[in-house]
Image (tube, rainbow, N blue to C red):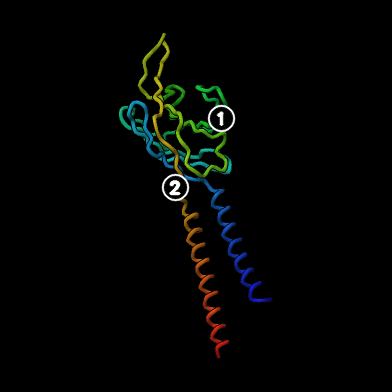
Amino acid sequence: MTKVSKSVLRAVTVLSVLLALACQAKASPIVFDIVNGQLDDGASVTGTITINTTTGIATSADVSVGSPDNQVFTSANITTLETLNNYRDPYTNTYVDTLIYIHQGTLGNPYPDLGLLLPETSLIGVTTQIPLVVGAIQGASTFEISGYPYVPEVFFSSGSLTPTPEPTTITMLVSGFFAAGGFGLYRRRRGRASGEVDAK
């Protein structure tokens, strides 16, 4: 086997390993940070949403809504976490969005809940920033209309879901840089060695 074919074989092997690692990392759940989340009433929204991008389903949530709504949604108190693909946008009457619905009420106490409406027909394969186009929170404070409890909705004025770098992805990138650097160093040393032999 010639020197060139050996070098090509090594390069292809390294790239194949990196590609396999990349596919494995992409298939795992991704944690999305809520960045610059704010409601129309001035309440800040912070926290994380974990999405399995293979199935397109939100698997966990840890979200805090500040004053004046003062709600906390965690795994300890969330009773319902749903991902509704092709959700109908009530404003445009089109099925182009995905709704992540977080609910912590019970049958006797149906509030509060939080909705995150995302401009994606599906969350499968999504690995980039997603704007929070429209969302709403319904608080625990209620008043009655014709004997039925009514909870006013408060909509998002800004915010996005932004993926945080995964440890596996970081490891993969670092390994890639080291592999590429090591391969280049190996080639340079071999070139010098062969040059010295030729000089002798």
Relative to 130, 41 lies left or right: left
**Residue that protrudes farthest toward the front in the picture:** 199
Task: Answer whether residue 75 is visible to the viewer in this image.
Answer: no
- Helix, strand or loop at mark 1: strand
Question: Which residue is at 47% across, 51% downward?
Answer: 166
**Residue that protrudes farthest toward the bottom in the picture:** 200
Q: Which mark is residue 48?
A: none
Location of residue 126 with respect to 84 vertically, above or below: below
Contact? badges 1 and 2 (CB < 8 Å)? no
Q: In which image quadrant can residue 63 be found?
A: top left
Question: Residue 123, image x and y in percent?
Answer: 55, 38
Among the two numbered marks 1 and 2 on one chain, the one whose residue lies closer to the N terminus? 1
* Location of the C terminus (image quadrant): bottom right
Q: Which mark is residue 164?
A: 2
Q: In which image quadrant can residue 125 be found?
A: top right
Question: Residue 67, image x and y in percent?
Answer: 30, 30
Q: Which mark is residue 96?
A: 1
Marks counted in the figure total 2
Give the Cα distance between marks 1 and 2: 25 Å
The amino acid type of the residue labelled 2 equals Thr
Location of residue 111 with respect to 32 vertically, above or below: above
Question: Residue 169, image x and y in percent?
Answer: 49, 54
